[in-house]
Amino acid sequence: MKRIVSGLLCCLVLLLLCPALSLAEGESFTPIATRADWALLQANPEGNFALMADIDMGGEPWTPLPFSGKLEGNGHTLYNLRVSAPGPHTATTYDGNRKQYETVFGGLFSVADHAQVRNLNLVNAVIEIETDQHCFIGTLAGYAASSAFENCAVQARNHLTLTSVNAGVGGLAGFSLDSSFIGCRADTELTFTDANKNKLCEAFLGGIYSSGCGDVRNCAVRLRGFAEVYGYIHSGGVIGMAKLPRGARGVSQLTGTEVEAEISFFEITPSRRAYCDALVGENLAGDCRTTRNTILSFQRHESRTATRLAPELCEPPRYREEVAPGTCTAWGYTTFTCESCGYSYRDFYTPPQHQEAVDSVTDPTCTQAGETVYRCALCGQTRREQIPPASHRYEESVLAPTCTQAGAAIYTCARCGDSYQEPIPPTGHTPGPWTETKAPQVNQAGEEQRFCQTCGQALESRPIDALPYTPTEGVVLTPDALSLTVGQAARLTARVLPADASDTEVRFTSSDAAVASVLPDGTVQALRPGTAAITCTAADGQQSACLVTVAYSPWQWIRHYILFGWLLED
């Protein structure tokens, strides 16, 4: 078996090194490069997709997807796929008596209906499902209806434990309905465990597909199969049971296929059939024509009593781990070996990869590409990776523009001194707010201007409307009467009406300046006894008057009349 595994892995490596891009001309494909990108298929199961890289599925639980589009693998590989439950989608399968069952499915795809899958590889796929429903599992698809699988290669361990009736385990597909498998390779360990002793189960096991109908051409199968069945088992190195659906015509083709198979089983039933063959376990009514196939080896191990046949003979097994690192051309993996029974399997695969280190570097110049040479520490193979020209490393200096004169951005390469300039247009004036430069007067316009905020140059001017003339309607003089003694002074207040009159100038006059004089600001000076009218005249002629009475104070009177003060007066 180790020789079988090694041979298939070599085939997978060759497919990786020589991917076949078979996108049809004019077809548009959505790229898939990460595990997360598979959500695109779930959103558009009828679309066209293409793998752009090997993808580590991470060993995380995978929910099988329905698919009816095209998937171009481009020779890339999905590795470490884990499926632990069937997908939610169902389809109808049938048993050897063509009795129909509503069935669930497990695999990369649950149901592949009119799908096309090409040039896709799966390494270390593990499908391990336990269910009480009718169920078929296969590495690529649990159910394949009118679908085509071409140049695909899988290395998988598929185990189905069932308490229901109709079930199957296949290397590429579980149940096939008129599908084709061309140029494919399957290296699989397939196990079926019937967990219900009280119900007759009909189980199927096959290296390509377990039951149904469909063509298998130019494939290679490496199978190690185990079936523990309380009922009937149909197991074959390529096909478990070949049987057309009711009313169908035609014959399935199995041709040009190489087989290495070892199948161990028991069948506990009142009427034992024990169908097991290197090519087709049960070929009902010759529904499958077999031609030009090669049986490299075939071993059939049948037990007439119920016994433990599954590869893990110990319960529970105690595994010893041994890591084999990947090389330039071979996958890395971890081998788990049971310390009690010696059963071993491989898991946690890592892809082939050179252990490269930088061997030499040629630095690029401003105009010429450089080169990095990598050398593999394992095989010495070199790989050259071009370094794009470094291009000029320009540093910028700026001759700032003014409002009216252009500037320039000057770029000079720090590596080689190359220089060029790019003009910077004048910035243009930046107008500021309007500023009053001449205040408007009554019946006389004013002026305001705008200046450049950068250089201060006057840019434009515009007139300010002249103030309108509002005539005076009157003048109020406060107080309107004064009594003063000689030598006293008082201030009169004039208020022009209306308050917004254009000319608020007033003029004061005295009817008898010898008795009382008045200053322009309205200050009245009492000079000698008597009366005088102080008149306030507004610009438009309106007047108001204040009667001023001047007398001697008692002391002034005594001095003037009793003491003959009048003699002293001029």
Image (cartoon, rainbow, N blue to C red):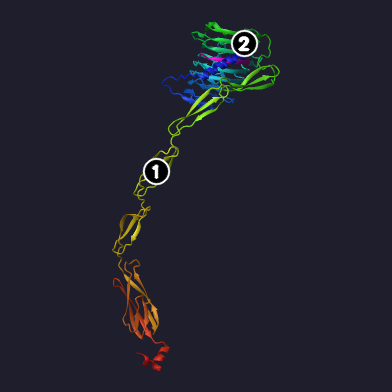
Secondary structure beneath label 2: strand
Mark 1 to mark 2 CA distance (whole Å): 80 Å
Q: Amino acid at mark 2?
A: Glu
User: Residue 182 colored magenta?
Assistant: yes
Residue 22 belongs to magenta span: no
Please state the horizontal and vertical placement of residue 496, each as a whole percent of the image: 34, 70
In the orientation shown, which residue stands out farthest toward the front?
Answer: 416
Which residue is labeled 1 in the image? 409
Is residue 362 shown above or below 141? below
Residue that label 2 marks: 262
Q: Where is residue 407? Give x, y as percent.
A: 37, 46
The amino acid sitting under disc 1 is Ala
Query: In the rendered image, which quarter contains the N terminus?
Result: top right
Look at the image and give the residue range highlighted in magenta: 181-192
Split into 4 quadrants, where in the image is the C terminus? bottom left
Query: Can you give x and y, in whole percent of width and height, for residue 281 in the image?
Result: 58, 9
Q: How far across and down, in percent of the image, does residue 552 sit?
A: 39, 87
Quadrant of residue 411 within the rendered picture: top left
